[in-house]
Amino acid sequence: MQPKIMMKKKSISASKASLVLFLCQMISALDVPLDLSQPPTITQQSPKDYIVDPRENIVIQCEAKGKPPPSFSWTRNGTHFDIDKDAQVTMKPNSGTLVINIMNGGKAEAYEGVYQCTARNERGAAISNNIVIRPSRSPLWTKEKLEPNQVREGDSLVLHCRPPVGLPSPIIFWMDNAFQRLPQSERVSQSLNGDLYFSNVQPEDTREDYICYARFNHTQTIQQKQPISVKVFSMDSLNDTIAANLSDTDIYGARPVTERQPVLLTPTGSTSTKVELRGNVLLLECIAAGLPTPVIRWIKEGGELPANRTFFENFKKTLKIIDVSEADSGNYKCIARNPLGSAHHVISVTVKAAPYWITAPRNLVLSPGEDGTLICRANGNPKPSISWLANGVPIAIAPEDPSRKVDGDTIIFSHVQERSSAVYQCNASNEYGYLLANAFVNVLAEPPRILTPANKLYQVIADSPALLDCAYFGSPKPEIEWFKGVKGSILRGSEYIFHDNGTLEIPVAQKDSTGAYTCVARNKLGKIQNEVQLEIKDPTVIIKQPEYKVIQRYGQVSFECIIKHDSTLLPTVIWLKDNDELPDDERFLVGKDNLTIMNVTDKDDGTYTCIVNTTLDSVSASAVLTVVARPNPPFDLELTGQLERSVELSWIPGDENNSPITNFVIEYEDGLHEPGVWHYQTEVPGTQTTVQLKLSPYVNYSFRVIAVNEIGRSQPSEPSEQYLTKSANPDENPSNVQGIGSEPDNLVITWESLKGFQSNGPGLQYKVSWRQKDVDDEWTSVIVANVSKYIVSGTPTFVPYEIKVQALNDLGYAPEPSEVIGHSGEDLPMVAPGNVQVHVINSTLAKVHWDPVPLKTVRGHLQGYKVYYWKVQSLSRRSRRHVEKKILTFRGNKTFGMLPGLEPYSTYKLNVRVANGKGEGPASPDKVFRTPEGVPSSPSFLKITNPTLDSLTLEWGSPTHPNGVLTSYILKFQPINNTHELGPLVEIRIPANESSLILKNLNYSTRYKFYFNAQTSVGSGNQITEEAVTIMDEVQPLYPRIRNVTTAAAETYANISWEYEGPDHAHFYVEYGVAGSKEDWKKEIVNGSRSFFVLKGLTPGTAYKVRVGAEGLSGFRSSEDVFETGPAMASRQVDIATQGWFIGLMCAVALLILILLIVCFIRRNKGGKYPVKEKEDAHADPEIQPMKEDDGTFGEYSDAEDHKPLKKGSRTPSDRTVKKEDSDDSLVDYGEGVNGQFNEDGSFIGQYSGKKEKEPAEGNESSEAPSPVNAMNSFV
């Protein structure tokens, strides 16, 4: 709300400014142009009461205008002042201003008096006010003998200043010898006359340098009174003095300081009077004595103190009312009050008034034969008298003028002639002052003239008043008319206001008010016109005003001030802080439309105002910045009411830094036991500054207080004084007493030791007592030092003991402690649970029973029974898993438990053991049990391939967890139409040994949904679903496809191969992951366009899922395949590649091959032909090609003499397709199960051992020569 209010204030100010400008225009319209004859007019003069500096020249001003230019003369003390006869006095050229030369030997006192200036020309004479000249005086203080003031503590005292009488009166203040102002308060203050009042004196008022100073501003001098000495006697010192000088019977003044009710020191009596003049400042004062110091309150009897004009000063001892009027007359009562009573004084105020204008006479311009009046009306208290002068002479003795008639405060003129021109003076006076006004009557005959410049441009903000000037002069007074535009009609109506000075006012100017306006002035002597221009501008608006901000100290804050303005006006933005300029600080950054304050400090708190000025308008908006911070630390900590077990702490809060204090935290330090360590004691609300604290004996306390507000915690206060409490017996015993044996033959007794302040005295020790429970035995006790553990040896194993620990110090024992039960040490249980029975509930859950062991054999705290169980064998498949024992713990003395999460159709073993705090006992004999069959898991995969017009081929993998003997597979399928509605469901049962099925007699171009699951004798497992579509015709599919994904897996790698149909140069990738895992698929890129890839780094004995996709074909990939890597097996084969004989053999073979190549090269250069090359040239068999760079396959060279047929499957047809009869045989069938692998040239090599050979490298492996190792393996 505040910014809106500020903007409103600015608009009001703009309206006031327009009104003032308009009034000035009205006055200036009455001025006679200086080129026409007119009587004199006083334009400048010195004040009526003129106090001058006696060291400087005296300048008495008197300026006037007129036509012809006036001449000047002066009177002094009522008689003519001949300045030509005084060499020290000169008059400025073309002026009536006097300069009295004091600096060249003149004395200001010689020119003291009453001066009056007269300005005269042929049309009349104007006179100035009576100017009283008085030189300023600053006399010295009269010497006086000042006696020391000896005063009793609590009495009142007045130190009189009595400054010398100066002109004007001096300003009084009190200081000491060091020129430091004496501090003032409700108890000690300075009165209006300069005296220093003490309502009651205190010992700290004793000093010898109370000095009163008087400052005379005119002469810029300070006068000093002699120092005044004050000595305050306290009651104790006064008693000693009186006792030394008087007899016992004379001692009557040695009474203690007593409190007194208030007594007024000034003004005296019960009533007084005060007279003040209207418009002045009323000052009323009351100062009272009393103990405690009285508080002053002011009221007006029968009324209220005037709002907005009433102020309290000098600690409410002075009532100040500014700009008083007659309505402020009345009785004002001051009331002085303290707890013992009150005193009051009534001041009767009367407000008088020097004369003030109601209607001052104004210049009158008439044409010959016209009538007119001069009116002079004034008021005052008492009522002023009115007298007239003509050209400075009382009108009663002035030359007669038949056209004028005096009627009290009015002069009436009828049928004036040119000789009627004159200057008339009106004097209104009473006992408090006078008013003098000059007004001329100028008789002229002049045609109209317009004084406003032609084509003057006026620019006004829309929706504001527009004032178009037409300053004119003429005699008789011309009539004014306004037109809009060159040929417009005369302006009339309520939307226009026509002022007497010729100004046209458009109260609410709009955009359509823009244009040219013509002013016409006419009288009987002529006519004249003038044209002005009016432009309407858009107002300046702050569209984003600064907002109230709360910021922490050292933070950063920004105020926005975004404006919208007329494009033709140039705005300037000024930021103010608390209505003053921004501090000259680089932390204040003024941007185009914001103000940013960096590193805010407390002094930045305040109101920030954005002022936008243009040449036509001004708007502003304000916002308050509140800087908050953690509170300042409390201070002045005081301890009172010290008792043995309590003390009262009080403090004074520090500055809350604009965020209220919510609470105080009290901390204490034990200087005796833990010096330098502060502990939490208590906390109290933020409104509380005292607290009663509970204390412990034998602690050297210091306290500190921390204030807390929403911002945080203050720094700790300074520590309080120390307070040492007396020693006492301990109040409490150790806590958390326990008896637990660490060995079978001992008892370890432990407890939490008392803290230092809990000891209550020196010599803290502990009395430890114990005895065996339920045995008629005496207590055994021992006193130990300030420790927290004691070990009793030679105890029986795990028997209960009664234990107690008592604190004691040098002053005695603590109260009797309570007893606790402990046990000596535990040992391992002796026997195993018997009669262990297992009841199989279902395929995954079994219940085990056992008989509890005798508690005596537990030899400790019974923790419970532990069941160890593990799977021995899976009955449905060979287990490759490591035997993992599982443990279930059953707390307490339970005799049965449930074993969840078992695997169906498996053999398990278990045993049971009892456990105590020491460990586990012996295991029961192993118990064997079997779980029945369960439902199988879902088939590992379902692939649908080879779509035709009426058939689909289904392939699947057996369940990863058969959970029994598979009896069959259940296939359900149904068609889906274009609206995704399902057709009739068909169900087929498939033998368990099948892994594929061709569905025939299907509808062409139809989508089918398939549901597939496996069954055991228990029931059906979870199903998997798949969808497929039969084709429309036998045309080759338009879209590419990847099918027949096969895998051959070893321990840590697998060979993946597939068939691809689609565009050439496809780039494949292989994705794989652990079967059944929710982890993201891992992706491997296949180099080139090969149709096989080797996955490496696999985990032995793990099931994996795999699929193949083509890059660039979004969403195109094969169905999933599942394979399992072989188990990790120890290698028995020796790597011959590392044997020395093998390395030597390979080097010899390489050397022979090199020699053979050299011989062939020599023969070729001699013109011989290589037989293979000849055969190749002779038989251009398209199926026998060298290695192709695009697919990485090999052609084969055949020796013509051998004529041996190629091995089946060793050559790839040129159309890059695999015949169905060849692809039906899996490559795995030729190897040793999962240990088969591919050689570098793509041929398959069986391994006769479990050792993994070096894995083939990625890329175009077939383009590299076979490694010696692989070659040797092929040999073997």
Image (cartoon, rainbow, N blue to C red):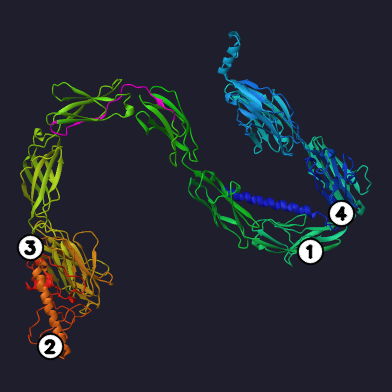
First in sequence, mark 3 or 4: give its number. 4
- Mark 3 residue element: loop
- Mark 2 residue element: helix
* Label 1 – label 3 distance at C-alpha: 129 Å
First in sequence, mark 2 or 1: give its number. 1
**Residue 262 falls in which quadrant of the image?**
top right
- Camera sees residue 816: yes
First in sequence, mark 1 or 3: give its number. 1
Question: Which residue in the protein does label 4 denote?
Answer: 69
Give the magenta part as a residue range. Answer: 720-745
First in sequence, mark 4 or 2: give its number. 4
Residue type at mark 2 is Pro
* Label 3 – label 4 distance at C-alpha: 140 Å
Local crowd size for mark 3, using a 10 Å CA cut-off: few (<14), some (14–19), many (≥20): few
Local crowd size for mark 4, using a 10 Å CA cut-off: few (<14), some (14–19), many (≥20): some
Residue 724 within the magenta-colored segment of the rendering: yes
In the depicted structure, whether residue 419 falls above or below residue 268: below
